[in-house]
Image: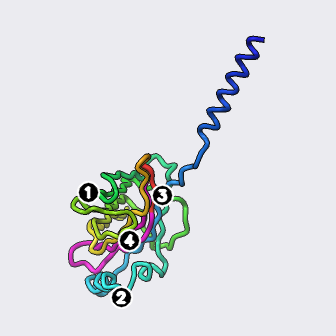
Amino acid sequence: MKKILVFLAMAALVGLGGCANRGTPLTPQILTFNYAVRAVPDASALIASVESGQTTVSDLLSRDPCNFTADFSSATPPQVFPYGSPGQTGFNVNIVSTAPVGLSTTNPSSCVALDEVEINIGGGSEALALGVPTNLTNGRIWLVDGRRFETSQFFQARVRAFDTANRRSNGDFQFISRLSAGSNTVLIVEGSYALTP
């Protein structure tokens, strides 16, 4: 009889523990973006037209973009590093993937895989609030063919939500980077993220 009571008590504890672990599940981790490398007649004019609102990054990507959607089950998933608190000076979010692995997707044959990704949203001198667009700071993407798009000439991003308890963050971003200073080869990117540090 004593063994049966011990067994029932253990079963009850396991059952209670299972219930305690139930709750609102975390949103899946997501890092996804469309991108395209384009040779354009005048990169400065293209970037100026986006900055002035005459055209949009979405419009520029409307024709056969490449897609990257991170595989978070890989050995090297993207990482997010949030610093500070929303609305306070210096709040920013850095997303880094030094060996990005993407989920299988159908891309145009011209698409080149990614070698490194880094997206820095917010700057040290800015009091970035949730939902407010920022043009600070940068998107950096290296491709496996050796091309390195280091610095964004156009950058816009937004941290849409931030949970102070688990430091989980989500938002969106878009940027245009030149292959090198004065180059008319540009990388155009638009995407979103939902990540837990």
Residue highlighted by disc 4 = 174
If you read the primary sequence from the N terminus, does the residue marked by circle 2 or circle 1 appear first? 2
In the rendered view, how is the structure colored?
rainbow
Q: Is residue 138 left or right of residue 27?
A: left
- Pointers 2 and 3 in contact (CB under 8 A)? no
Asked if 8 appears above or below 95 in the picture, the reply is: above
Q: Check disc 2 and report its element: helix, strand or loop.
A: loop
The answer to which quarter of the image holds residue 138 is bottom left
Question: Which mark lies nearer to you, 2 or 1?
Answer: 1
* Percent position of residue 5, x then y: 74, 17
If you read the primary sequence from the N terminus, does the residue marked by circle 4 or circle 1 appear first? 1
Q: Check disc 1 and report its element: helix, strand or loop.
A: loop
Q: Check disc 3 and report its element: helix, strand or loop.
A: loop
The kind of residue on which mark 3 rests is Ala
The kind of residue on which mark 1 rests is Gly
* Percent position of residue 45, x then y: 28, 86
Residue highlighted by disc 2 = 54
* Percent position of residue 59, x then y: 44, 83
* Percent position of residue 109, x then y: 49, 72
Question: Which mark lies nearer to you, 4 or 1?
Answer: 1
CA gap, disc 2 and disc 4: 16 Å
Residue highlighted by disc 1 = 90
Neighbour tally class for label 3: few under 14, some 14-19, many 20 plus, Cα within 10 Å? many
What is the chief secondary structure element of the magenta stretch?
strand
The kind of residue on which mark 4 rests is Gln
Which residues make up the magenta segment?
A: 169-192
Q: Residue at x 44, y 50 (%)?
A: 196
